[in-house]
Amino acid sequence: MADEHLLATESFQLCVSPYGRVWPVRAEKPLPDTDTRTIGLRRLAQFLSLLRFQRRGTVPGYPIEFRIAPENIHIEQPDSEKELKFPAIGILPGRGTSEPLGIGPAKVMEKTWNQYGNGTVLVMQGEYIEDITIEVWGTHRAERRALVAGISAALRSSDDSYSTRIRLPEYYDQVVSFSLDGQQHIDDVDVVRGRRRGFLFVRMRLPEVQLINVNPLNPFVLVQDVGEDVDVTASGATGEMPLP
């Protein structure tokens, strides 16, 4: 939740108490310039660019190894028209949902105290979930088969989970997970032009966190010495009871 000092005018009144308001007053954290979804998909693109695919060649027993260049993996539509070079991968968006942790305020992640800046802590706001589609493009059947089979295997290569989990250093070291839900080969009129594609249906899940300002709570007790010769009478008693 943004503080009103991040708004264009301070006369706008919010009916909530924003995160990160501390005393003495400190500068608010600026609004983020990149959404959580994009951060997760960028890491997925890096992961896919490192995979070494193998397709069958003309000589039996000697497969041909290939990789997808990072510039041929697109997580969104380019700003201008661009020629697609095969093999290539595109990420088709789905409807994303943000699921809160429950009723009430966000959860303070106490272990992140001062980890990403002095006087700061992360709060867990919820989880972002989106069903994305990985669209692969190849020039012939063997290339498409290798892409679909390779990505399917890579997303299920964990020895302790069905999903692949990737750490996000640029997002406070949070972890994004990708789990494979299914696949589909597409054979349409473009196959005669050497354009064969396939779909892999993947669910992406990652936590939604926010870095906020926080001040330590230092409780103390103030004791005043009134001297030894001062008597204090307790109220409500039937008689006078001097206190030491």
Image (cartoon, grey):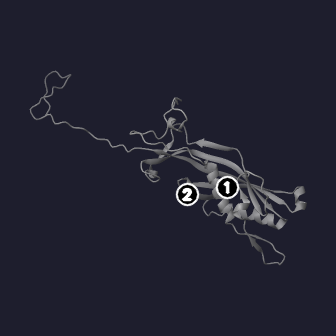
Instruction: Classify 87 as above or below 227.
Output: below
For image coordinates 12% across by 35% down, the residue present is 227
Instruction: Classify 31 as above or below 162.
Output: above
Q: In the figure, residue 178 lies in which quadrant? A: bottom right
* Residue 179, numbered circle: 1
- Residue 129 percent across, percent down from the top left: 64, 47
For image coordinates 66% across by 52% down, the residue present is 204
The residue at which mark 2 appears reads as: 169
Which of the two discs, 1 and 2, sits closer to the camera? Answer: 2
- Residue 89 percent across, percent down from the top left: 74, 59
The front one of 100 and 234 is 100
User: Can I make out residue 162 in this image?
Assistant: no
Q: In the figure, residue 165 lies in which quadrant? A: bottom right
- Residue 77 percent across, percent down from the top left: 74, 51
**What is the C-alpha distance between the residues marked 1 and 2?**
20 Å
Instruction: Classify 211 as above or below 1.
Output: below
Task: Name the secondary structure under disc 2.
Answer: helix
